[in-house]
Amino acid sequence: MRIDKFLWCVRFYKTRSIAADEIKKNRVSLAGQTVKSSREIKEGDLIKIRKNQIDYQIKIVQIPKSRVGPKLVPLHIQDRTEKEQYEILKLRNLNQEHYRNKGEGRPTKKDRRDIDGFVEGDTNSDMANSDWDLFFSDVDDSKID
């Protein structure tokens, strides 16, 4: 199986084209050497991937026939990434929270949904609809045609 297809099948990248682009940018290596997207892989190979500013290392246990579900990924790869790399990622995520506290700046998608739910659930909305009905009740239907 091609390496770009494999990385897509084990859900390391969302699309196969993204996997191919990352390989072209030399962010994926096999046995210490950069590879092309067409490189064939086999069981037992060790792949190093640079993603989210950390270095992942995965060992191929089994090659899937097609894209697998998230729960089945551990059957096909073995994660050999060093624990320090995950610590770096965790620290980076904590630092990002420092820049924007909850409730500051532009609302997130979740915040927007909460705001919309609050506005739609407002008890005064029925009164607002009746106001609109009164506003348009003055219009004579014969003049519109």
Image (tube, helix red, strand yellow):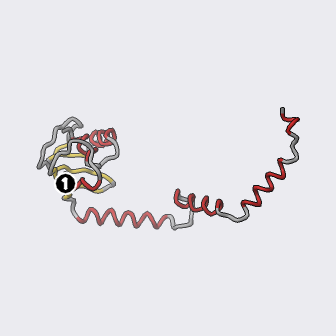
* Whether residue 129 is situated above or below residue 36 in the rendered picture: below
For mark 1, does the 10 Å Cα neighbourhood hold few (<14), some (14 to 19), or many (20 or more) residues?
A: some
Residue that extends furthest to the left in the rendered view of this protein? 44
Using the rendered view, name the quadrant where residue 34 is placed: top left
Q: Residue at x 64, y 63 (%)?
A: 121
Give the answer, above or below, for where 43 lies relative to 116.
above
Position in image of residue 62 (x %, y %): 15, 48
Give residue 87's quadrant in the image: bottom left
Q: Looking at the image, can residue 94 be seen?
A: yes
Question: On the picture, is 133 further left or further right than 71?
Answer: right
Residue indicated by mark 1: 75
Give the image location of residue 83, x and y in percent: 23, 65
Q: x and y percent of residue 94 in the render?
A: 40, 67
* Image side of residue 59 versus residue 53, left or right: left
The residue sitting at 37% across, 63% down in the picture is: 92
Residue type, mark 1 in image: Leu
Residue placed most toward the observer, 55 or 110: 110
Q: Nearer the viewer, residue 96 or 111?
A: 111
The residue at the far top in this view is 145
Q: Is residue 12 above or below residue 40?
A: below
Secondary structure under tag 1 reads helix
